[in-house]
Image (tube, rainbow, N blue to C red):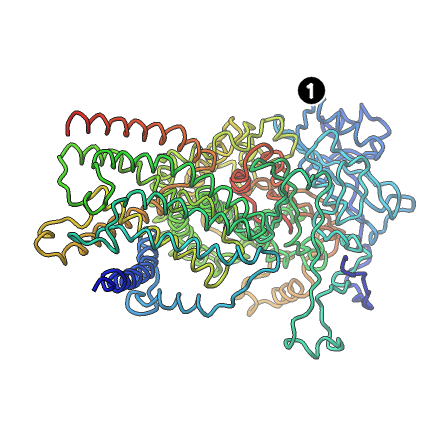
Amino acid sequence: MDWLNLLVYPAVRVLVLFFVLLTGFAYLTWYERKLLARFQVRYGPNRAGRFGLLQPLADAIKALFKEEIVPDHVDRPVYLLAPALAIVPALIIWAVIPVAKDFPAVADVPIGILWILAVAGIEGYGVILAGWSSNNNYSLLGALRSSAQMISYELPLGIFLVSILVLAGTFSLVELVEMSRPWWEWLWLWLVFPLFFICILAETNRSPFDLPETENELVAGFQTEYGGMKFALFFMAEYINMITTSAIMATLFFGGWKGPFADQYVWLGPVYLFIKVVALLFLFIWVRASVSRPRWDQLMRFSWQFLLPVSLMHLMGSAVFTVFLK
Amino acid sequence: MPLDVSPKFRPYEVLPSLNVPGIPAVAPLPTGETQDTRRIQERFGDDVLAAGLHVGAQVVYIRPTRLVDLARFLRTDPRLRYETLVDVTGVDRLELPVPEGEARFHGVYQFRSYSRRQHLTVVAPAEGGDRPRLPSLTSVYPGANWPERECHDLMGILFEGHPDLRRILMPEHWPNHPLQKQIPRGGEEVPFTLTWEDPEFETLGKQILPAESVPPKVPPGMDSRRHLIINMGPHHPSTHGVLRLVVELDGEDIVRVDPDLGYLHSGFEKTAESVRYKDFVYYTDRMDYLSGMTNNFGYVLAVERLLGLEVPQRAQVIRVIMAELQRLAAHLFWLSTHVLDVSGTGMSLLMYATRDRERILDLFEMACGARLTVGYFRIGGVSHDLPPAFRDNLELFLQVMPQKIDDYERMLTLGPVWEERLQGIGVITREEALDMGLTGPMLRGSGVDWDLRRDMPYSGYENYDFQVPVETAGDCYARYRVRMEEMRQSLRILRQALDNLPDGPYLADDRKVTPPPRAELDLSMEALIHHFKLMTEGFHVPPGFTYQAIESNKGELGFFVYSDGSARPYRLHIRGPSFNNLYAIDHMSRGHMIADVITNIGSIDIVLGEVDR
């Protein structure tokens, strides 16, 4: 029955995961619009369905039935490949995240954290290729910004990850969640959580770090030449990335699926994870509604002059703690 | 390939004139003298054709050959110190009974001394008859650049020595200069006009018309090989309308910005020549569509000045209330869009500020029934009296608003990013601001202590106690501070105006100018006749010209009206503050990054309806 374990179960898990993520994406847009509206003394979507709950469905139908326009002046293969490249990493990063006790989303690979770093590295390509292939000045500027920004923020992000890794002593996310950590380790982690969150914001191109697509300077940045479903794919990538990174942060900093009685009742694991993810998503949206966007050189300066040294110091601290306290 | 828009003149029937003999008439020459005109006359002797006072303003007629000398003298002479050239325009006197041998075109210049609180109008007859020429003043006042370009574009006056005499509002290939009197209004066939005889009409709606895509020319002086040139607009989220900025970029650094205007040019000045004085009030609403009241204000003041009309006290205070409310509304909208442009996440602030702006618009709706294009002012007063509930609502508004302004300021200044984004960006020194002829918050942000409301008061502004905020840094942050403080001062003025709102008529009772009240029509035959005459013919304005400026929320809004004695303006020129302030965008943006262009546009606070007029 080996093939069952090898193919069928993972396939089923993948399908379930896709379903959950895509539905999650759809309702994340609803959640964001509702929340933003509340922040901005508006109502938000309230026409399609009760509380506007069918709005995501309406949006999906609209995006699907839009005319597929490929401008003449684009580099066609790359132009078509880019949206796919953007969305695939956002989905596959989920494979290693544990959703319940002894239950990773797809597979418990021993190099879970490395997998996250590697896939996050690919994410930039979608944006960069989209901007490059569009053959448009705005897209090009957006893509250049995005590549610089992603490289700059991946460094401190990676170093923070390494720091966590040093503390945990394992690459596997499943083990990371299940191991018991002393109280000082939690504190030490939470100390840098805000900075980690900033890196994540930059990594997912979320406001206030949405410089690659700043609508008020670059029209729509790298997505200027995209429309219909291709645009929707970028949109999906961004939102699924938000979910994914929230799950990663929940896993690394807040114990993932853990919670009262989650050990006894396995089904509670996903529920706790869901709650933590939603809370983190709220943070994303809150930031979007209230924090101004820095200029692009200020963004870079912040990364290189502040985040990078701090992350290195944190790494050193972790190493010292690990050696002397563990 | 340029589109062929060569004019096809339709037979143009001119209505038999209603005018009595003696109309049209040339504006009379100035009489008397003042200190300044005497000094100019002493210096220039016979080259001064006439000098003195005209409709309460100092006017000097100068021979065009000495114009540049005069300008230099005005600017440098320690006893004159006219630091800035506010406006340049022209008058085509083709339809006036001009004496034989006199020039057809007149160039009209408005000089302003901020330190001495003086205004001087200089008129220079243009040489060259139907192909007029005048020397350019750009060497003395660099800010003459755009006004002269506009005058060249619309009036056809060739400014000799101008560094960049391109068209500015009309398309490059436009066949004529539309403000010349022989050019009929609506006479030209525009390429998008379809007549019933057109063969294309058969298939209209059944095909996609082939549209030639013409790549726009790169402005002279830009290097498209070494640098990246991007086209911001005319459809761009942050240009506040259909403004096109050609931006030359080295990486993300700005090398040069060349604004391309005129996408919203709607020929207000030409239109004004064919509507009666009282009807043009509604056109002014559409100019700066965010401050309709203010535009009304400037226009009616100019005409009232020509008429020598006394406006009742109550009307004056109502006008001040409306103008200050409008300033608040426009500043709130400026704030919210500026924040949106700069930080992207200002959507929240946009919504909050818009909510408060709604309250102001509600007040407008109470007073006149309209919210945006108000048309509330009349020559001689305002159209309706304030309704009783207006007072209570304004009272409520005045109680709420100060807290709101503080809140918005805290929302921005407590965050680290806002100051970082604005400080040191778009710096204009005091000298540069005077050179470029900037006005309003742009001027006050650069350390020039000048506000028309205080320094050349109109409509009873001298009775209010308020301060004029001035900042010296000259960057975007200084202008932001100035505008925020102006909102508070507006509230102060509103409070005083509301407390001292007198009773009495809201419209002058000069029956030759303002229509009688409705009730009077039922009783008085004379009132009926007045009403009939006013509604059909309109009132006549004595020949002459005047330049009336008011402090609009964006800067100095000036109306130059030239009357030939008939019921329509012979020439009406609007000096839009957005237009002259936008000239600074190139200077402000050079060397900064592309994100700063957006900051600068927001900081200049333009409305394209007024830039293009």
In the image shown, does B255 or B259 lie closer to the viewer? B255
Few, some or many residues within 10 Å of mark 1 (<14, 14–19, 20+)? few
In the image shown, does A276 or B361 lie closer to the viewer? A276
Which quadrant of the rendered structure holds the N terminus of chain B?
bottom right
Determine the residue positioned at 34% across, 49% down: B396
* Mark 1 lies on residue: B78
The x, y position of residue B277, in whole percent, is 66, 56
The x, y position of residue B437, in whole percent, is 64, 34
> In this image, B30 relative to A210: left or right?
right
**Three-letter amino acid code at the position of disc 1:** Pro
**From this viewpoint, which residue is outermost toward the right?**
B101
Q: Quadrant of residue B118?
A: top right
Report helix, strand or loop for mark 1.
loop
> In this image, B533 relative to A59: left or right?
right
In the image shown, does B585 or B521 lie closer to the viewer? B585
**From this viewpoint, which residue is outermost toward the front?**
A1
Q: Is residue B422 above or below residue A92?
A: above
The x, y position of residue B404, in whole percent, is 35, 43
Determine the residue positioned at 85% across, 47% down: B104
The x, y position of residue B249, in whole percent, is 61, 39
Q: Quadrant of residue B89?
A: top right
Residue B321 can be seen, yes or no: no
Residue B81 can be seen, yes or no: yes
- Count of marks, rendered view: 1
Q: Chain of mark 1?
A: B
Determine the residue positioned at 57% across, 40% down: B555
**From this viewpoint, which residue is outermost toward the top?**
B78
